[in-house]
Image: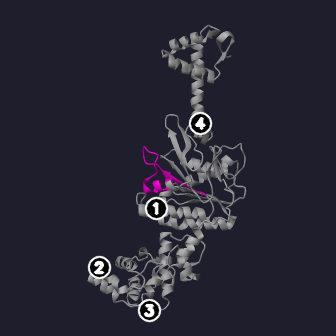
Amino acid sequence: MSGAPLNGHLLSYSQAEIIAAILGDETGALLEQARVLPAAAFTDSSCAVLWRALLTLKPGAQPAAALVGCGLSEPELRRISEGSFSSLNFAGHLRTLHRAWAKSQAKLLTADFDADRLSLEDFAHQCGDLYAAGNEHTGIKTRLAEARLKFDVEPPPLRTIFKLNGTCIATPGNLVALLAQAKAGKTAFVGAAIGSTMTGSLDCDFLGIAGTNPNSFAVVHVDTEQAPADHYHVIRTALRRAGLDRAPTWLHSYATSGWSPTDRRTMLPHMLAIARKEHGGIHAAFIDGIADFINDPNAGDECFPFVDSLQALAVKFDCPIFAVIHQNPGTEKGRGHLGSQLERRAETNLMLEKDADAGRTVVYSTKQRRAPILKSDGPCFRWDDAEGMHVSVETVRAGRDAEEAEGARELAAEAFGAATALRYSALLAAIKTACGCSERTAERKFQAMRKHRVINKAELGHWRKAG
């Protein structure tokens, strides 16, 4: 029976023989040493079932007790329990099996440690297990000590990495969810955000987002959907926005269309570690297509740990991670359990909503830890054929005000007619006649004329048309 693949080769031992060694150890010491292994490390289904039964045993219990009631057939039990395996270098074999599983599932929390050189205790600690060989409480105490608030250690000032319309939306160690329906301009907005990190110029159009990078830390960008040519043009447009011809060396942009979810999860920590090593830190990371990192966005047992690991990476690399995800049709909710968990964990949930009639996309956020960015005030953009890219346009509120002002001017011209000045009561009556509206509506339209300075107050309680 062969083991799980590792670097293109087969593991040099049998999973059944590892469990046989544990079952044959009456002291239970090998079982306690092996508790660092999750059931998913066993690709042999029978071994996985029996391993789950072993993990339910309390410390000191006879491992053979797991054979009772585990649900395996007699031939399966015989095949496993009659195997033989020496306890010599048992810790090394466990480490090899754990490393194979961790790499295949992208569970490594660090991308730069060498598992071959770690003791089993250190390896278990780095992988986040609560059990350390020889003392099941060591891992728990260490993790609690690290997590406990230290009142005498003041954290550094909060660093703003990105702003939208002057409001902070991203700080280190946090997630930002970017949600939108298909073809709403998500990729264009991500490209603009990347472009904003390349210059401090205020004359550039970055669609309302700003994220200057004064330390020239790395920006990591992972595109899961675009073909290589489209991916190239996303970055080329970002450079155009910044007024540059060449990309800075600290921009690490990857096209991963065609990769498997496992490959993406495995490579992400390595991308971040390589970028940090080369440039001294990570300014921000963008994942355009976070749902492509998992197999099923509706599988909670897959999505919840993945979002946890994503936030752990944001903390580890001291940067915000932007996660782009499609919304469910007709709602503001992200896809499945993945979208729901991202929204709960995110520091900011940015919504991109496209008005099909106007061809305009508005960016706003009502679910975030700081001041909300209302839809009426959020930055807007639309495609411009002449520019060959999306460009900023007036906000919803500004557009609404402009329409209201134009309507007020037209109404004033009709209401005044040839008159140069009218008393308030006469003007109100003229508005009612022109619009065929009630007196209350006429009063609102009068106030709109005042707001937009279409009319001015004259002498003796009269009103004049401006201009």
Q: Which residue is mark 2?
A: 69
In the figure, 269 relative to 23: above or below? above
How far, Cα to Cα, is label 4 from label 2?
66 Å
Q: Earlier along the polypeptide chain: callout 4 or callout 3?
A: 3
The circle drawn on residue 395 is 4
Q: Circle 2 — which element? A: loop
Is the Cβ of the residue at disc 1 closer than 8 Å to that at disc 2?
A: no
Q: CA distance from mark 4 to mark 3?
A: 72 Å
Residue wearing tag 3: 86
Q: Which is nearer the N-term, disc 4 or disc 2?
A: 2
Q: Amino acid at mark 4?
A: Thr
- In front: mark 1 or mark 2? 2
Query: Which of the labelled discs sits on residue 420, or is there none?
Result: none
Mark pair 3, 2: CA separation: 27 Å
User: For the N terminus, which image quadrant?
Assistant: bottom left
The residue singled out by tag 1 in the image is 304
Place residue 274 in its image quadrant.
Answer: bottom right
Q: Is residue 374 left or right of residue 197?
A: left
* Tag 3: amino acid: Ser
Q: Nearer the viewer, mark 4 or mark 2?
A: 2
Looking at the image, tell me whether mark 4 or mark 1 is earlier in sequence order.
1
- Answer yes or no: is residue 290 visible: yes
Give the mark nearer the N terminus: 3 vs 1: 3
- Range of the magenta residues? 320-343
Residue 320 location (% of width, % of height): 60, 57
Q: Earlier in the sequence, mark 1 or mark 2?
A: 2
Q: Is residue 11 visible?
A: no
Amino acid residing under circle 1:
Phe
Outermost residue to the left: 74
Q: Nearer the viewer, mark 3 or mark 2?
A: 2
